[in-house]
Image (cartoon, helix red, strand yellow):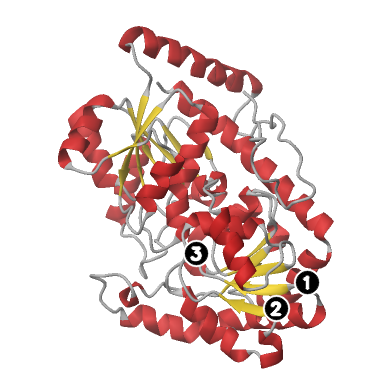
Amino acid sequence: MTLSRNTNETVFLNPYFRAPVMPTLPPFYNRRRFISLLSGILASRLVSARSHGRRPRILLRSAWQTANIGDIAHTPGFLTLMERYLPDVEITLWPGDIGQGVEQKLINRFPNLKIVASESDRLEAFSECDFFVHGSGASVGAIPQINQWVKETTKGYGFYGITFDDHQSWIMRPDTPEQLAEKVAALNGAAFAFFRDSESLKFAKQRGCTAEVMGFAPDAAFACDVRDDAAADAFLRANDLQPGKFVCCIAKLRFAPYWLFKKGYRRDPAKHEVNERFKEQDNAPLLKAVQRVVRETDFKVLLCPEDMSEMAVNKEMIYDRISARDQAKVVWKSDYWLVGEAISTYRRSAGLFGLQMHSPIMCIGHEIPAVLCGLDQQTSKQIMWDDIGLGAWHLDFDEAEGREQLPGTVLQMLLDPEGSFRKATAAKRVVEKHQTSTMAHLGAVF
């Protein structure tokens, strides 16, 4: 199985792009096991065709929300992996939320995708699909749906690219022993459990997870290739941003204040208190980095969001605090965007830095340099940066040393473009290595 680039596609800005090669094997597979799994893919297709007279079918539980482009990107990322490695498999998406135009974007990119939109659709999917996949996400989060699947079908399921921690990024208290036990039980019932960071894998083993196959599968958002070049180009022209001559920056609060923009969310005083307590500490280094970039280099800065709260945070914590002279080289994006426009913009940038996780993931997925500023609230998913060889671009913002390192790290990333793009490309190769092996296993379970 080999990878190939679409020759009709716009060339990556990364001038050091090399065509992907067959990656080496991750540590949890030996060569014999890997070849066996690859053979299993072919065998499974033949068995399915002979016994069922149709292609294999997967039910994907994903699309958790649309208020954050990272949560949007998980789904097209997984679908792209399936398209690349297991193109004969039919996919039905059982979504959490595909509003705000996301559904149409998915259909445009994946016209054969089936979507569960009603109870009758769900019953049909349960009857027709052969296997259930819990998509990339912040936790073992779809236990009710897994239990329903197992009870009604007795068919298998697996987890692809999840974090497993003792607490969730949106909850301020650790899981109870009962909650952890329920999650471990769900993991143990799976045909495979692939975690998106090494700490999650380690934690699962410590908690007694004994799934037959466990390993590392980077977040599926790395593979997201949804694009909106027209929207990105129009925005860049309107704001005098030249490809390769600007860097993206994302400020944020520790907890997304969903009560400000999502219906049904009540204000959380405890989360608000944490946000207010840390927002100066967390975002001041970004402000310093922006000031140094515009004063010491020829690059401009684009302040852009990953979730719906961050337009306001970017303005309050950075744009409104810089001089009029500095503002001439800083663009504040005042509205939210979807994954396609974001990725197309990142692809035209010289890199990205900030307090979010999935925009850096999407950048590396397109071989664009990205510095991750880690916070405790991000849970262990931030360790993914170390897992793919980007430890030097993973700054611990809970420590003063990490915060102090940001401005210099950003300048070095911008002023050494050859080294930075090569580093981004190398990280993507690590990601591809694990994508290849884990997709091989997924193909072998049919």
Residue that carries the numbered disc 2 in the rendered image: 289
Q: Which mark is residue 378?
A: 3
**Alpha-carbon distance for marks 2 and 3?**
21 Å
Taking the spot 64% from the left edge, 41% from the top edge, the residue there is 9
Mark 1 Cα shell of 10 Å, populated few (<14), some (14-19), many (≥20): some
Residue 146 in picture, x, y percent from top left:
28, 40
**Given contact means CB atoms under 8 Å apart, are the residues at marks 1 and 2 in contact?**
yes
Query: Which element type, helix, strand or loop, lies under badge 1?
Result: helix
Q: Nearer the viewer, mark 3 or mark 1?
A: 1
Q: Is residue 371 above or below residue 63?
A: below
Taking the spot 59% from the left edge, 23% from the top edge, the residue there is 34
Q: Label 2 is placed on what type of residue?
A: Ala
Q: Label 3 is placed on what type of residue?
A: Gln
Q: Nearer the viewer, mark 2 or mark 3?
A: 2
Closer to the chain start, of discs 3 and 1, is 3
Is residue 394 visible from the viewing direction of this image?
no
Q: Is residue 252 above or below residue 214?
A: below
Mark 3 Cα shell of 10 Å, populated few (<14), some (14-19), many (≥20): some
Closer to the chain start, of discs 1 and 2, is 2
In this picture, residue 116 sits left or right of residue 407:
left
Q: Looking at the image, which residue sits at the far left? A: 120
Residue 322 in picture, x, y percent from top left:
64, 89
